[in-house]
Amino acid sequence: MKKNKLTLFIFIALIAGIALGYILNVNSIDVYNQNILNADAKVKSIEVSIAKSTDTTSIAYTQLKAEKKVNSKIKKENEDIREKKLEYFTLLSDIFLRLIKMIVAPLVFTTLVVGVAKVGDIKAVGRIGGKTLGWFLAMSLMSLVLGMILVNLFEPGRHMKLSLPDHLVNTGIQKAAMSVKDFIAHVFPKSIAESMANNEILQIVVFSLFFGVATAAIGDLGQVVIKAFDAIAHVILKMTGYVMNFAPLAVFGAMTAIIAKQGLNVLNTYAIFIGEFYLGLGILWSVLIFLGFLVLGRRIFRLVNDMKEPAILAFSTASSEAAYPKTMMLLERFGCKDKIVSFVLPLGYSFNLDGSMMYMTFASLFIAQAYGIHLSFEQQISMLLILMLTSKGIAGVPRASLVVIAGTIASFNIPEAGLALLIGIDPLLDMGRSATNVVGNSIATAVVSKWEGELKESEV
């Protein structure tokens, strides 16, 4: 009953946040939004004029530079005022996300060590790891291919007919496509304290695997460590229960701030793109549920129903991390063995972000379409494979999907300035991606549990 109450409160907070955000947008924030839009349009227009200027010593060039500086300042001032007016709403979601991040690293560490130590030998760890990574690889590839098929089918960018921008246009997003060498180096922590401090889930997983296997290898002495870590994990899960009580306030604050800033007009401007992307997510959910049904049978519907609360939480806060502790608890209640949950779920946060994967091909090809750049089938396949590699292990990076897209599209001579088309609506798309990531990881955990013969009847 308590679980249902929290879900209900989160949903009420979601609706209330949208309503208050709309009222604030219309009555007090709209004037700043207009000033920001006008100043931004002027800055972009001036950047184009500056790019066309051949004489950098002329008075006209100096005037353009001065005008750009003035308009950039106006934009910044209005953004600061807007943030100031909404700071108490963003503070609510910031505090909640900080509390969740405070819990995630120690929770992953303690539960994974206990899980691996209980599995026992290295062969069993390798077997479960192999099945897990096999499923993740297949789902990531399926999500990327689905995104590619849908964006070619819908062609959401074709109607935009944009002219190619000048290279000076700055999106504010750093390119960070990892090379294979960087990725492999990034997987292994040089300091577990640093990994914990930065919430580098993949590095914590690597350290925990070594620690867990070593704990199992020392026999009876290791039992002391397992008992201690098991107790710590239960304490952290109890803390999670306390933190979750703040979830409705966080959802209310996050939704109020995003709707107050963006307004509902952003939905009209990009209605086709947003609609087609969410339709794509719906198809992805259907495919994931169907594949889950092949392994789990009718229990898949119970699982998806159980995941309502973490999915709504991830959707509202646009953070799959926010839903991690709750997802973990509900999977164990569903009947997945704790050692499988604590092994598969952390890995999923680095390797199995289905919603984000689909978005990456969808968004990259949308930008190409918007500029009328045709990519051959071979180019699209190579882009898909690059995204497959570069997207791993960057779950902790803010705006991770945009960062990966920025690094990838440059290789195909697609203007990075095209990311500016997505920055405004990215928070709205991130909400759907985050909820999908939670569902995808839940299904993966249940599937591996079933394959290992470790799926019990669910607890009521």
Image (cartoon, helix red, strand yellow):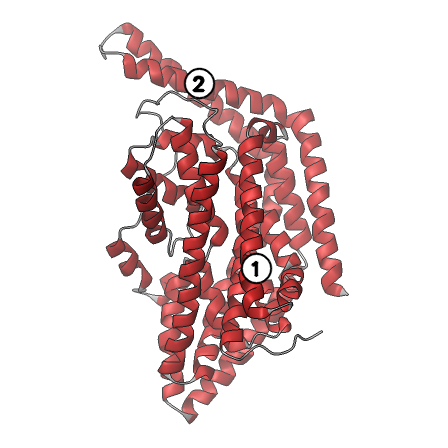
Depth check: give the residue in front, 310 or 81. Answer: 310
The numbered dot on residue 380 is none
Amino acid type of disc 1? Phe
Q: Position of residue 285 (x, y in %)?
A: 57, 53
Depth check: give the residue in front, 6 or 91. Answer: 6
Q: Mark 2 highlights which residue?
A: 71
* The image quarter in which residue 67 lies: top left
Residue 103 in view in this figure: no
Relative to 344, residue 436 above or below: above
Q: Position of residue 130 (x, y in %)?
A: 38, 71
| Secondary structure under the numbered disc 1 in the rendered image | helix
Residue at the outermost top position? 59
Relative to 433, residue 23 above or below: above
Q: Quadrant of the C terminus?
A: bottom right
Q: Is residue 362 left or right of residue 12?
A: left
* The image quarter in which residue 446 lies: bottom right
For marks 2 and 1, give the CA distance: 52 Å
Depth check: give the residue in front, 349 or 358. Answer: 358
Q: Quadrant of the N terminus?
A: bottom right
Q: Residue at x 65, y 54 (%)?
A: 247
Depth check: give the residue in front, 141 or 237. Answer: 141
Mark 2 nearby-residue class (10 Å; few <14, some 14–19, many ≥20): many
Nearest to viewer (mark 2 / mark 1) = 1
Q: Mark 1 highlights which residue?
A: 290
Q: Position of residue 86 (x, y in %)?
A: 61, 36
Relative to 397, residue 222 above or below: below
Mark 1 nearby-residue class (10 Å; few <14, some 14–19, many ≥20): some
